Image (tube, rainbow, N blue to C red):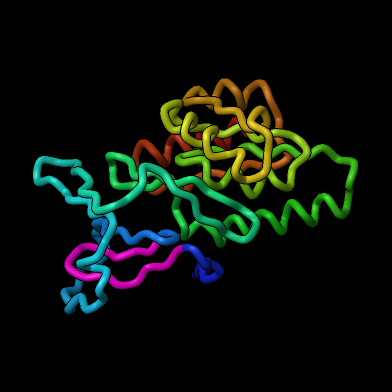
Amino acid sequence: MWIADNWKDYEVIDCSKGEKLERWGDFYLVRPDPQVIWDVPGTNEHWKKKNGHYHRSSKGGGEWEFFNLPEEWSIRYRKLTFRLKPFSFKHTGLFPEQAVNWDWFSSIIKEAKSKNPDRPLKVLNLFAYTGGGRHPRGRLQRHGILGKGKRRRIRPCRRAHPLAGRRLRQVRGAGNPARQYLRRHHHGSAFLRPWSQGRNLETGRQYLSLY
C-alpha cells in the first residue's frame, strides 16, 4: 500500500462513529466515511470547532452545515495548487489519497521526456472524476490532456486548472462519450479507474479493448 504522506495542507486528524475529522489548509471538515466502524472518544478540539459538517440523510444523500467556511479556498501539494469547494454529495473536488498516483505518473512522464525530449506526450485520463489528477500531468506535458468525465464536473476542473500553472485551453473534457474518442485518437498512455464488478467491470473491459 502506498501512503500519501507528503501533504502539508491536508491531514486526517481523527475518526470515530462513521465520521472523519480532516484539515484542508486552514479549515476543518467533518465528513462521513463508511470505513470508520470504531467508536472512540473524539478528543480533538476541532470536532467542536469545525468549519463544515456533512450530515448523511436516512433517505439518501445529505447536506452541509457550515461554520465560517468560505465558498471556495485553495490548498497546495508540492508545486500544485487546487481550488476546493464543498459539493452537495460531500466531496470537496479533490481526493488527497491520490497524491501517491500523481507522484508515480509524474515520475514516469519525466523519465519519458528525458529519454526523448522531442517526442510529443499525450495522456488520456479515463477517471476524470474531479479533475485533480490532470494538474500534475498537465505541468509535465507539452500537449493537453483530455479527461473522460461528466460535463458538470469538467466545468469546476477548468475553473481550478489555471491555479496549477497551465493555460485553460490545454485541458479539454470529453464528457461521457469516451468510447467514440478512443476510436478516433491514440495516446501514449491512459489512466483508468479500478473497476470492481458488474457493469463497471464490463465498461472497463470495453475501454481496454478499444485502447
Horizontal and vertical percent for residue 33?
Answer: 26, 59
Q: Nearer the viewer, residue 3 or 181?
A: 3
Magenta-colored span:
10-23
Magenta span includes 129: no
Q: How many marks?
A: 0
Q: Nearer the viewer, residue 50 or 59?
A: 50
- Above or below, comparing residue 176 to residue 6 in the picture: above
Horizontal and vertical percent for residue 165?
Answer: 67, 44
Q: Could you tell me which quadrant the C terminus lies in?
A: top right
- Above or below, comparing residue 29 to residue 123 in the picture: below
Magenta stretch secondary structure, dominant = strand
Q: Nearer the viewer, residue 159 or 118?
A: 159
Horizontal and vertical percent for residue 127?
Answer: 50, 41
Decide if residue 119 is on the left or right side of residue 162. right
Quadrant in the rendering for residue 153: top left
Q: Nearer the viewer, residue 149 or 195?
A: 149
Decide if residue 65 is on the left or right side of residue 108. left
- Above or below, comparing residue 47 to residue 98 in the picture: below
Q: Residue furthest left?
A: 58
Residue at point 30% right, 72% down?
A: 14
Residue at point 54% right, 38% down?
A: 126
Quadrant in the rendering for residue 25: bottom left
Horizontal and vertical percent for residue 39?
Answer: 16, 74
Decide if residue 140 is on the left or right side of residue 153. right
Residue at point 28% right, 57% down?
A: 51
